[in-house]
Image (spheres, rainbow, N blue to C red):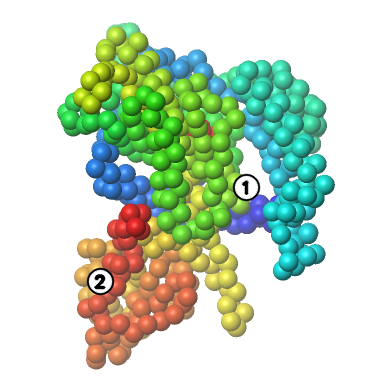
Amino acid sequence: MAKQEDLFKTIVAHAKEYGFVFQSSEIYDGLSAVYDYGQNGVELKNNIKRYWWEAMTMLHDNIVGIDSAIFMHPTIWKASGHVDAFNDPLIDNKDSKKRYRADVLIEEELAKFDDKADKEVAKARKRFGESFDEKLFRETNPKVAELSKKKEELHKRFSDAMNANDLNELRQIILDYEIVDPISGTRNWTDVRQFNLMFKTEMGSTADGAMDVYLRPETAQGIFVNYLNVQKTGRMRIPFGIAQIGKAFRNEIVARQFIFRMREFEQMEMQFFVRPGEELKWFQKWKETRMKWHKTLGLGDEKYRFHDHDKLAHYANAATDIEFQMPFGFKEVEGIHSRTNFDLGQHEKFSGKKIQYFDPELNESYVPYVIETSIGVDRMFLSVFCSCYEEQMLEGGEKRVVLHFPAPLAPVKCAVLPLVKKDGLPEKAKEIQQKLRFDFTCQIDEKDSIGKRYRRQDAIGTPYCITVDHQSLEDNTVTLRHRDSMEQQRVNIDDLESILAEKVSINSLLRKLVE
Ligand code: ATP
């Protein structure tokens, strides 16, 4: 674990050093759990958003986008249940004075059973070598069976407590399992209390009577309250979806793990409106579609898994998370929820407006059911960043740090490097860059040795370096260096655009999605 923690620290430092992510307000000592994206970070983030947006709105004839305001009428949050129920169960350690989410402490305890079982499997694999049958071992080994039984016991107690909102029982579990504060190492815990996560502010001048408003904790409600507008003006027929990318705000108490848990973050959400009774079929369909979107990036299929919810949110009748293997374990990146007709039904009730769909095939009106896919841009960024980071030892003892970004997501697609800063090579390089810049983020770099320039581009994940040498002036060719293999290929300058387009465009990913 310590190794993984060190690796994570190195990755965070790299993100800062190479202009991906900065602490917000750093010169004022920072603002906790708020981050800014730098010159390379913003490009990576925009590419992730583009991949999602185009996959949703361009590859589905029945999905359209909107961009709703962050401020909304406060009654919306009453109707959605967020004012009353958007809480986290918190517990304080009296010695360290640190506050934790009780549910997260218990989930971490649960994960320890898996870790122990994995260790047993790893030991056995070493022992048996080639002939090792993992499935059989997991089914028959008494130690693994015992761990799985113990995990199941805790799991049941935990989900019962969460479902019953039993805060005393959550505390009791923490005591019974002797969970200690990672900082103080003690078990001196307070009671568990609920804490609302919404930020509140005032709108309008006090003289006119200011109104309390909230910074939205999710983008979804902006879609629900525009359901009728979009359905009518877009003449949408069920099933159809509305997609949105935008900021969300949560007063997270336990803000740890860099951009994994932020107080201001960005969500990409899609609400898919369906006939009542068909929601579980669509839930299944969206689980598959979303997993394919993730896996198409090629970060490694084994890094993803589904995690079904133990405690369903107040609005859901089925829910799962897509988890990704971060350096600190498998963690939620995306939630897929079957939200029933709860939200539209509540808005009908609170607004007094009829929010229904007349289904011409059934010849009846109903409040549509909703499947939601909700992914955090920042968590997606973190999963891409962490899984692409590699420190490689090269022949001759040299080391390089390389970010193996999927080429369509890379902040800089290509860098044009004149071999020397004379003999007309910089001019030729400029000419190439001026041509490519209409289609690709394309840098020009003349400083330092060619080796150093390659390292700089590797460290920000540039998939292609184009080197201009003396031969380029004679026969209009350059070398194209591939980031991952470091292979160099001689190509004609006139072919660069088409070679790059095929590899680095978002289209190349979108095509794979429909294969
Ligand atoms: P968690 O259990 O980790 O707090 P959640 O289940 O509350 O997350 P959802 O409400 O389902 O999260 O939000 C959908 C997505 O929004 C999450 O899958 C995650 O990617 C992202 N997200 C939620 N909270 C944060 C946060 N504080 N910082 C960054 N991303 C977040």
Q: Is residue 119 left or right of residue 68?
A: right
Is residue 293 at least partly visible in the picture? Answer: yes
Q: Residue at x 71, y 59 (%)?
A: 133
Q: In front: 196, or 208?
A: 196
Residue 13, above or below 364: below
Amino acid on which the number 1 mark rests in the picture: Gly
Amino acid on which the number 2 mark rests in the picture: Ser
Labels 2 & 1 near each other (Cβ < 8 A):
no
Give coordinates of residue 397: x percent, y percent.
62, 79
The residue indicated by pointer 1 is 329
Neighbour class for label 2 at 10 Å: few (<14), some, many (≥20)? few
Label at residue 498: 2
Label at residue 364: none
Is residue 13 at least partly visible in the picture? Answer: no
Give coordinates of residue 498: x percent, y percent.
25, 71
Q: Quadrant of the C terminus?
A: bottom left
Q: In front: 508, or 275?
A: 275
